[in-house]
Image (spheres, coloured by chain):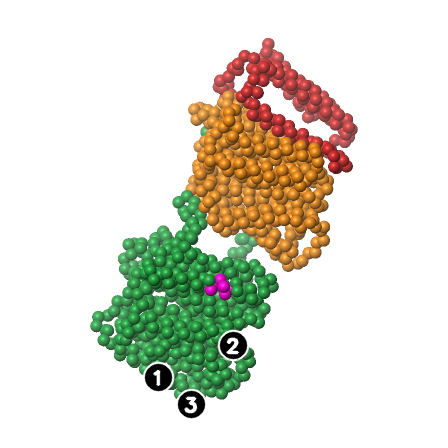
Amino acid sequence: MNRSDLYSLTPLLILSSAAILNFFSISIKRNHKVIFAITVLSLIGDFIFLTSYSLYHQQHIDPLLVVDGFGIFNIGLILLTTLVVALMSYAYFEQREERKEEYYILLILAALGACIMVISKHFVSFFLGLEVLSVSLYSLIAYLRTRERSDEAGIKYLILAAFSSAFLLFGMSLIYATTGKMDFGGIGYYLTTTQDIPLIMMAGLGMLIVGAGFKLGVVPFHMWTPDVYEGAPTPVTAFIATVSKGGMIALLVRFFNAINGYQYESFTNLFTVLSIASMFVGNILALRQTNLKRILAYSSISHIGYLLVAFLSGGSMGAQATTFYLVAYFITTLGAFGIIATLSDQHRDAELIDDYRGLLWRRPLTAVAFSAMLLSLAGIPLTAGFIAKFYVITAGIGTQHWLLVFCLVVNSVIGLYYYIKIIAVMFDQKLQIKSAKELHPLVYVISSVTIAVLAVFLFWLGVSPEGMLSLIDDVI
Amino acid sequence: MTLNLFYFLSFLAVLSALMVVFSKNPVYSVLYLIITFFTIAGHYILLDAQFLAVVHVIVYAGAIMVLFLYVIMLLNLNRESEPHKSNILKFAAVICAGLLLVVLVGSLKGTEAIVQQSGKAGIGYVKTLGEVMFKEFLLPFEITSILLLAAMVGAVMLGKSEKTNDTI
Amino acid sequence: MKDFLWLIPTLPFLGACILIISGNANLPRRAVSIVGCGSVGAAAILTIVIMIDFLTTGQIPEYTVIVNWFSVDNLSVPIALHLDTLSLVFVFVITFVGFLIHVYSIEFMHHDESFARFFAYLNLFVSAMLMLVLADSLILMYLGWEGVGLCSYLLIGFWYEEEKNGYAARKAFIITRIGDTALAVGLFMLFAELGTLRIQDILTLAPQQWATGSTTPVTICLLLLGGAVGKSAQFPLQTWLPDAMAGPSPVSALIHAATMVTAGVYLIARMNGLYVLAPQAQLWVGIVGAITLLIAGCSALTQYDLKRVLAYSTISQIGYMFLALGIGAWSSAVFHFMIHAFFKALLFLAAGAVIMALHHEHDMFKMGGLRKQMPAVFATFLIGSASLAALPLISAGFYSKDQIIWLSFASQQSNIWFFLAAVVGAFITAIYTFRMVFLTFYGEAKTSVSHMPGNLITQPLVILAVLALFAGFIELPHTFGHVTLFSDLFSTTLPPVTLRPNVESHEWIIQTSTGLLTLVGIAMAYYFYVIQPKIADDIHASTIETHRFWYAGWRFDSLYDAIIVKPILFFARVNKHDFIDKLYSALVELSEMMSALFSRSQNGILRWYIMGIVAGAVIIITFTLIITP
């Protein structure tokens, strides 16, 4: 471990120091504001530090990690996402009775785990990162213990994640048993030099896909998503939907490029099946749903399906499309959950569609922002979602994945139904008088500004995506 | 000799693992689980991994299972309080697990061809392990500490009673 | 200056956004008028600055790429604006006349409840229209094309409480849609044949690809003509424009006289390179123009409603422009467009002032004697009418129309019928124009004046009147003056007209005779409607059938009703339950059923979920094992 290694690892060090700092700060005096400030400042500081790297930075910290442009980009994405989640958490937790402070420690640690994951090139760091992320998430999901579904969601996630981790570990050990290697490059080397790949190796890779598929929530490993999304506090849901899934996608891209998985037809076929199943099952399940958090859960299942189309296209085009889709999906999802979080009151989250009836007439700006987020999820032009979907379709067509592209288009139509349904409800004229206890309006300023910034980004990416596209082009 | 011992331990491991599932009384299940852990530890020793074997016995068989027993005792679980499981679910579970078994066994085909990598002598000793862990794999070792921190914070936060709201 | 080009369409668009978001209630009227007029005014100032820049340096404006929206692989989607002299003239008219009409509207719409909505639509229209004429690719132009169609629909039906206004709006929208479909098909064909929709590329590629007169360019040109005919209310799709007068008068002035309806002229002028390759199609442009100018002129003779006279005269004048395009007199068409925009906007605005003064009375036979009561409006209206009737020498309309009539005689591509149509049309124009003037402003007063127009109304009228008088002097015929300032502008953008040999000597004969014909027409109108109104009544009585036929716009409405609307309604009744839709509702039901089925798997039972994972694992591992590489 030399100086340049340390320099490359500094973002992770800053995150862990922030966690420790929070830890001590709690032991001195519990103060939501202080903890919040430390968290936000360290995330911002970390991001600023990150921008000091060159885009072509390449530092191998053998044998575990590699800090390259792609990794830096993803770390940046994770940091910003965590920052947004933290910003929207303040108002959300301020109005709740529970202790709020530990939340931020766990949030930072979860982000740290995701960061480790996206720069790993070795099974050990991959698994450790994943576990740091998962373990933090267990307690984050069950954080609001007074709510009935929160314990249930936490324990469900705990058991299912542990179960899928077992698959992951078993898969890794089978691969290790065959190749004697645990770093991605070594496995890739083994695959290129071996003529007859043993069945056990393939089974191991299959198990890896099971473990990864669970984290991504693709069909048939999707069943936890709606329950956990519904039970978790809304900012945590946003975190699961974005960082946890995005980190895994980034890792998959790295792993598949290292072992050149695209040349194996069995894997591409497998992912094709997973992708199509995810798109259809996700969208169809969302059709009759009336709980907004569950709708977004199902929609996230189908979005991962869309993402897999880009992922399957492979090559630099596929990686670009995947990354851009991730960025657009992050912004949109954060915005949507952010709005749910701001509308929630101290007893329950604003998760039923009926809570949004006539929102346009009560809070016009929020309703407009929410409509923008939903339209972006549906992929309507002038939003980031459109460009992302367009990109994905182009990538799919470029590699002749006609079936996938066809399914994607069909599903976009199905998806439109329930997104538009929510918008229609918001425009409903029937006024509903709600007499919820409101906090000091200043508390909401942070959340509102955050959402406004997200909405601006959404349109900015939709209207002039060139900057982001060239940035992604550079890092890949 | 080693081979016979391996078969004996494996038989015992599988048998006791099955008993864990089939016992009606949770206390019996836990006890069978302890036996399973011991047999696994035996496997580790056969693989020349003494340190792992010892840790396994201490942590799993010793600490965790005792905790399990306590919890079961406190919850007063017994045969009567066992929740009803539908037969369809059981049936489906058996089929699923059976299929998984078949597939995994099927994937073992051709494993004989894999060249055995003979490890260095004494690979399982504490000293060797320590050298690897604190030199080559120092970073993941540190990350493990973060993992533990996260788990600890989470456990304390969830486990604490709601009344003592303003002190740790 | 090119760098600011993008601001021209953007400013009105921003204005529209602000007004739409703030709505009717949130902004005071003063702020609404400042935003509405200010944005268009700023665009007009920018245009004038660009014009001055261009005129002083003499450099040809080039096109600017605003943004490369995004590029994926080798497909890039740029949003590019193209400015040349042709679009510059259009931009100038749109922004400048548009600005005057905006100012006029402040007073005209002052008592309307939906003040902000009106300005929002108007701004949106200006922005879409600017997009149409500035677009570098046909796709972007089509966006503007549809945008102005939408705004036209919204503004015709602006007073939507009254049912007939909504009907008129729908009629306009649907009929122009027929033309738009033809246009869209034409664009598809162009893209299929040439692989690009950038106008400049098309114009350079087309001559290389096709021989003159081959089938493909003729077909494409006819399809484009279809679009132009719909938008510009030409035969046979002219029926929507008279009904469109249901909108407020400033709307009629801006959209249905000065700018939007001339989009067809712009389209054909812009695609001149294609029409040169398709002489047959160009001949059809001329035929359409000639027919339209005659039938609309005749209809205008018989109308009672002041605004409907103006509407028919608009159709007829655009017919002149089409005629000019058809005979290859490109710059004459654009010249007539510009002059027409000035005097027709003026006439509509003045008519609006009259109508407002008389309690929204539209019938000319109930007006009269306003000469004394509203002198300013009378003076400006008279100037506009003189220009419309092409009063020789002193009006701008004379110079632009005379050029078309002369070229319809002299052009290589013309024939005797075009010339006759143009001359007869000029004669009819003179009659109906001054019939309108005399009925409205002379004779005895029949309705009392209640509301005198204020400054915000009269000032735009005066400015437009000045333009309607003097704008013609930038282009004078050979016979006197021979000034070619305007046509020089187009030396690089539009091809020159080819004259028949040895015709120059006849020019003065034709000019004098058409001038005389105009004067005779005016004299006839004076005789029939001021001196001996009885004779007009007698003629009316003796030709009552023709009168009715012309009054109903040659009964095109009934014709279309019988051959198109009725059969469609019949099919609609037969297919009341829409059996094609059954397929889709079945799909919907299928999705709902699937949803119900799938949601049974989300039962919240953990064991079940675990089993799902195991089942998935079995499938995946089997998959990888069976299809091993």
B44, A254: nearer the viewer: A254
Q: Residue at x 36, y 51 (%)?
A: C195
Q: Are marks 3 and 1 in contact (CB under 8 Å)?
A: no
Q: Which chain is green?
A: C
To which quarter of the image does residue C232 belong? Answer: bottom left
Q: Colour of chain A?
A: orange
| Residue C615 in the image, given as x and y percentages of width and height | 59, 33
Q: Which chain is red?
A: B
Q: Residue under mark 3: which chain is it in? A: C
Q: Residue at x 44, y 36 (%)?
A: A315
Residues drawn in magenta: C36-41
Residue C321 falls inside the magenta stretch: no
Kind of residue at disc 3: Gln
List the residue tagged with mark 1: C520
List the residue tagged with mark 2: C453
Q: Residue at x 38, y 80 (%)?
A: C430
Q: Earlier in the sequence, mark 3 or mark 2?
A: 2
List the residue tagged with mark 3: C532
